Amino acid sequence: MTGLSDRAACIDVPALPLQLLLRREPGWVDAAVVVVADDRPQAEVQWVNAAARRSRIRPGMTYAAAQSLDSTVRAGVVAPEEVDLAIESIAQCLVDFSPRVEAAPRPTTPRQQVEGAPGVFWLDPSGMIPLFTSFDHWGHAIRRALARLGLSSTVVVGFHRYRCYALAQVRHGVWVLDDPTQETRAAGEVPLWRLAIPAKVRAGLERLQVDTLGRLLALPAADLRRRFGEAAALLHACGSDGWAPLRPRALTEPVVATKAVEPPDDDRTRLLFLLKSMLHDLMVELASRSQAMSAVRMRLHLDHAEPHDERLEPARPTLDEPMVIDLVRLCLDSATLTAPVEALTLELEGVEAPPGQLALFRTQARRDLDAAGRALARLRAWLGPEAVTRGQLREAHLPEARFQWEPIAAIGFPRPEVVGMPNAQPAPAEAPALPLARRLLPRPQRLPAPPRHEPEAWLGARGPVKSIVGPYRVSGGWWVRTVERDYYFVETQRGEILWVFYDRARRHWFLQGWVD
């Protein structure tokens, strides 16, 4: 018998970009509507609604072709930033139903394309029964919460994350599976055309009468990869029993401030003045997290009476203080207070904010992005477009190939990011936190061979060699020219740390750079 701790749930907000467009344009709900990549006649159609499908409009065709099939078709662009904000907003909503929430990102890798489109979320429903009495009530509560955001959804509660996702593609409403066997049997009947698999691969499988997920999982994984490629193998891996567990998002605490009112006061103007000073500090803290306010909770602690609570939500996440203060003022004016206020508590919920909104807020702190952009434009006009560049990381084996210089079209404020593997363990407290800044030469500089009798005099004018750490083998490039290098860190008596390597193919030593 499988325990409740083994449960998994998939929440699917189908065609999220299309739902966002219809939420923005409610008058189009009965029309043929498509989401296009950009605002031009030859733009690619990315999402279509049922009315557009009845007119034989399909994703992948151009907007001009869609108009030739239905002259009344409505089209709109949904920016990736708008989708990201919606995903963040939905995830914040789902945190009320489970502390472990994983959101499917916008697909950038083949594995992410197989896992699902934006709008797919996985939750851990463990421990929710005492709060909602049953998984069915829990699922319906989630759907009602998302409906308040103007979004329709499907909730499937099962045992395996990908099988729950597959079932969400063929069901509507809430479906709770009682045991893993029922889930496996139901997921095996899901047609392949409902899942994210390339049409060419699906057509090849269907010629072998492999048209459902169950029939695909019955095939050997190795043979499937060899005959149909990586996409089919990834789908097999996702649906198999060894699929990865839930990878929940890190919880972000809301920003909170409390201020005492001495003596207790019930004057709305003075209370608003105190709330305004608290709001500014909380907004600054949110902006430092690269977030915008999605909701504000206000608690008025009354003198010898029950606290008075209010919750306000702006039309969209914002960092506009005057607008929020106006909402707070309207709320205070309509509130009925049974006693004077002895303390105020303000709590702001945040979601990820677009760079433009952060720039508008941060320029008030003597940082003007427009002025910086004008300065860079003058440099480009004077020295050419290649004069203003930044380093962009690339996937490569050799150090000199792991980055490239690309022109800067626009600048923004820095955002702190955690660098490293998602599941990496934190370093021990006693480990020194010293970053290694490696400076690379434009071209590796050839070095003489180390002398046998006096190895400390190897580097000549750079000083005697104190110690050598290595080797660290780097190999690759077999498809063009085999590269085999042994890298070493060489410390000199002067305190320099040089980064050198021995090229096994060319049988020479080279200086790659040094470490600050």
Image (cartoon, helix red, strand yellow):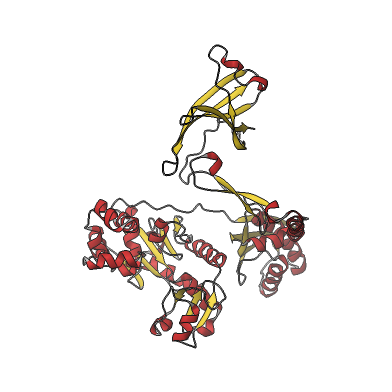
- For the question of whether residue 384 can be seen, the reply is yes
Q: Residue at x 34, y 68 (%)?
A: 199
Residue 262 image offset from top left, x and y in percent:
75, 57
Above or below 4: residue 135: below
Looking at the image, which is closer to me, 151 or 505? 505
Q: Is residue 337 left or right of residue 130?
A: right
Q: Is residue 73 left or right of residue 365?
A: left
Question: Image quadrant of residue 234?
Answer: bottom left
Residue 212 image offset from top left, x and y in percent:
25, 66
Looking at the image, which is closer to me, 489 or 253? 489
Q: Residue at x 45, y 74 (%)?
A: 47
Q: For the view shown, which residue lies furthest in the top direction? A: 453
Above or below 57: residue 381: above
Q: Residue at x 56, y 41 (%)?
A: 400
- For the question of whether residue 150 can be seen, the reply is no
Q: Residue at x 44, y 43 (%)?
A: 480
Quarter holding the C terminus is: top right
Q: Is residue 151 left or right of residue 221?
A: right
Looking at the image, which is closer to me, 242 or 148? 242
Above or below 151: residue 386: above
Q: Is residue 450 left or right of residue 99?
A: right
Residue 479 image offset from top left, x and y in percent:
41, 44
Looking at the image, which is closer to me, 482 or 422? 482
Question: Image quadrant of residue 476?
Answer: top left
Residue 338 image offset from top left, x and y in percent:
66, 69
Instruction: Report the number of discs.
Output: 0
